[in-house]
Image: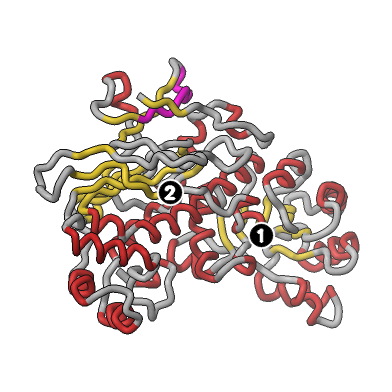
């Protein structure tokens, strides 16, 4: 696996250090007292959705699979751990041959989820499973937050294209992951070339205000851009006077001008005025793209405006106010002993303060009504009731350490569209509310 495919700098050989110090100290103690080999089951879930959200979106699954494959303690990593005295020599020797050999089940990427949904189930020895906690949570919490924001924005856009433009508003590696997650959630393209290179997402872009300002006149800038990119390009018309810029743009590019972009001002008012002006100039096919700190609420407010596409940056890559999903990775079952045949015993945290969890290896299914609309997320342990057998949500992603369910980004994108369509209509309302369907425990 090429590290660049993970969104990593090419000089980073593995994902093994994308973890917390205490994962390794737990490992050392478990190796010493004999619990390291106990068969264990960890699950990823969230106790609640971000405030006001009605559903969550699973994103980052493909990146998790890559990270698990690339979780290797090479010579440089082991030397770092030795020099810092993070763990003892016995533990370093164990880490040197680490390869995840267990099983991973999970909701497929693009699926929706609700409080208590067992989004990912990691099974194997305690030692090999506990090490993966931080990297798995890091990916799923970030990517799912971005995908959920993207999904809400796509619903608000009502089928109009959305361009992801947030690379300059976040960490350079997070920007690539955010673009990928946004694409799963319904965005159609990105301005980030690294995301296009790594994940095949369509990339778009033409010019910024700096290009206009570097020329002596706006006319000179437009002439240069059209000469270079053709009349189908998008001209930025709000550097000086919008009405004058639109007039100049059509004079230079002709009525076949591809689009104009508006990046400031009262977008609703300006869009109506620009549409009227374009039509009067004969550029009836010229599209209007709007940008400028948009979120799902701003997009929804423009539903009646003559806008053809939206470009979204800051609010998207920060999860539109919710940059994490508060997912946790908890041990829910472990073997009674290190004997491979020992039965699994459910375990769960019982502390106060709202951080309790439910023990046991879980399955999940989505109950629907007669018309196929989701009614409830049903989570349970033991045998799956016959009526729910065909609606189970978890699929096997890794079997005996080998990835068995890698899929294209397009498949995840299509799945999200289908999953969202199966929810009650109120799922896409932007007004604050609880999860659109309840979670029931069987």
Instruction: Specify the quadrant of the image occupied by residue 393.
Output: top left
Q: Is residue 118 magenta?
A: no
Magenta span: predominant SS is: strand
Furthest residue toward top: 370
> Which residue is painted at 60% across and 58% down in the image?
317
| Residue at 59% across, 65% down | 191
Q: Can residue 248 be seen here?
A: yes
Q: Nearer the viewer, residue 404 or 256?
A: 404
Q: How is the image coloured?
A: secondary structure
Q: Residue under label 1, please give it.
A: 314
Identity of the residue drawn at 68% across and 51% down: 309
**Which mark is nearer the camera, 2 or 1?**
2
Image side of residue 279 versus residue 145, left or right: right
Q: Is residue 414 visible?
A: no
| Residue 63, x across and y down, in percent | 39, 58
Q: Count residues near mark 1 (Cα–Cα under 10 Å), then give few for <14, some for 14-19, many for 20+.
A: some
Which residue does the image show at 24% across and 58% down from the upper left? 128
Quadrant occupied by the C terminus: top left
Which residue is denoted by mark 2 in the rendering?
Answer: 328
Q: 35 or 372, which is in the foreground?
A: 35
Q: Earlier in the sequence, mark 2 or mark 1?
A: 1
Question: Could you say whether the residue bearing mark 2 is in a helix, strand or loop?
Answer: strand
Part of the protein shown in magenta:
371-379
């Amino acid at each position: 696996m090429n590290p660049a495919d993970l969104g990593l700098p090419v000089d980073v050989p593995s994902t093994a250090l994308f973890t917390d110090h205490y994962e390794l100290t737990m490992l050392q103690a478990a190796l010493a007292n004999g619990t390291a080999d106990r068969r264990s089951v960890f699950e990823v879930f969230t106790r609640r959705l971000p405030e006001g959200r009605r559903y969550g979106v699973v994103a980052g699954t493909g990146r998790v699979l890559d990270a698990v494959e690339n979780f290797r303690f090479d010579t440089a990593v082991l030397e770092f751990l030795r020099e810092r005295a993070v763990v003892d020599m016995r533990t370093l020797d164990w880490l040197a041959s680490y390869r995840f050999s267990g099983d991973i089940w999970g909701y497929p990427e693009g699926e929706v989820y609700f409080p208590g949904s067992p989004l990912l189930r990691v099974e194997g020895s305690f030692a090999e499973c506990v090490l993966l906690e931080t990297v798995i949570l890091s990916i799923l919490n970030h990517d799912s937050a971005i995908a959920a924001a993207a999904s809400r924005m796509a619903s608000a856009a009502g089928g109009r294209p959305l361009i992801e433009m947030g690379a300059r508003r976040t960490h350079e590696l997070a920007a690539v992951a955010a673009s990928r997650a946004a694409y799963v959630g319904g965005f159609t393209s990105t301005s980030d070339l690294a995301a296009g290179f790594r994940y095949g997402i369509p990339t778009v872009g033409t010019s910024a205000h700096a290009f206009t300002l570097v020329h002596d006149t706006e006319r000179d800038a437009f002439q240069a851009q059209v000469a270079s990119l053709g009349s189908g390009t998008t001209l930025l018309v709000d550097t000086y006077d919008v009405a004058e810029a639109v007039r100049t743009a059509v004079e230079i590019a002709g009525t076949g001008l591809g689009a104009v972009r508006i990046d400031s001002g009262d977008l609703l008012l300006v869009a109506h005025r620009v549409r009227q002006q374009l039509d009067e100039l004969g550029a009836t096919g010229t599209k209007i793209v709007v940008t400028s700190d948009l979120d799902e609420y701003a997009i929804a407010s423009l539903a009646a405006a003559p806008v053809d596409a939206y470009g979204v940056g800051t609010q998207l890559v920060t999860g539109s106010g919710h940059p994490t999903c508060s997912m946790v990775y908890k041990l829910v079952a472990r073997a009674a002993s290190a004997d491979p045949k020992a039965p699994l015993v459910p375990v769960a945290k019982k502390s106060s303060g709202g951080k309790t969890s439910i023990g046991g290896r879980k399955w999940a299914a989505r109950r629907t009504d007669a018309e196929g609309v989701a009614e409830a997320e049903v989570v349970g342990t033991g045998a799956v009731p016959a009526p729910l057998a065909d609606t189970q949500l978890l699929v096997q992603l890794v079997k005996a350490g080998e990835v068995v369910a890698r899929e294209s980004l397009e498949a995840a994108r299509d799945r999200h569209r289908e999953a969202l369509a199966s929810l009650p209509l109120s799922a896409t309302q932007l007004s604050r509310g609880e999860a659109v369907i309840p979670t029931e425990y069987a």
